[in-house]
Image (tube, rainbow, N blue to C red):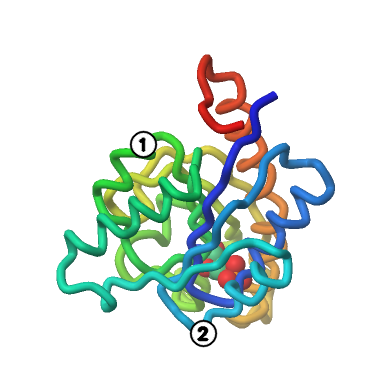
Amino acid sequence: MPRVNIVCFASGRGSNVHALIRGIESKKIPAAIVLVISNNSTAGVLDIAREAGIPAKHISEKQFSSHDEFSKAMCRALDEARADMIVLAGYMKKLPSAVCKRFSGKILNIHPALLPAFGGKGMFGIHVHEAVLASGARESGATVHLVDEEYDRGKIVMQEKVPVLPGDTPEILAARVLELEHKILPEAVARMVKKIQDEPINQHS
Ligand code: GRF
């Protein structure tokens, strides 16, 4: 069975990437994370990758003279890693459209709310949970969706709910949702890996 190569993008502490690493180690995900990319040179996710022996790269648009150069560098990094699919796990930037096109249908993102609610511009991190609480919603949850060139708009592939409880603060709700994220992201990634493995041709051995 050909190995599926996953490249993860993240901007922060990396607990979702760590959940994927655990999923691979426990054989729940029959794939390999071949590269972790962060736009933030001090992101904890880069340390998590390095500790797991996974190549980790800081790639930020600020390092390049143009968006086009940035896009080419990103595509080069993905080609060199022989990426088959991409996972965005708390990545605060937009992928260049060339990447979205090249990996169309093979890019997953995890969002800490029940999309399409509480998604889109400005809906990231603790702001999501603040908005959920302010809305009076009785439940929240996490969503894994395909990524197109807009934020949080792609087809939903997995979604599960958690209750909003009396006395919840944004931080308490965020922690409850994060626990669910660590469950559904590995499940959704495993499902996509198996789908790719069943594709007629997968060049990477
Ligand atoms: C997660 O809550 C994810 O839903 C959101 O960003 C956060 C990343 O957390 N997109 P971590 O870096 O995986 O711990």
Q: Amino acid at mark 2?
A: Thr
> In the image, is residue 195 above or below residue 9?
above
Name the spot of residue 109 as percent of width and height, x first: 48, 52
| Residue at horizontal 71 percent and vertical 59 percent from the top | 19
Residue identifier under label 2: 42
Q: Secondary structure at mark 1?
A: loop
Q: Is residue 136 visible?
A: no
Name the spot of residue 200 as percent of width and height, x first: 52, 14
Whether ligand 1 has any atom under 8 Å from the Cβ at mark 2 is answered as no
| Residue at horizontal 56 percent and vertical 28 percent from the top | 196
For the residues marked 1 and 2, what is the alpha-carbon distance in whole angstroms? 29 Å
Tell which of 131 and 176 is nearer to you: 176
Residue identifier under label 1: 104
Label placed on residue 5? none
Name the spot of residue 205 as percent of width and height, x first: 61, 31
Whether ligand 1 has any atom under 8 Å from the Cβ at mark 1 is answered as no
Tell which of 56 and 14 is nearer to you: 56
- Ligand 1 is found in which quarter of the picture? bottom right
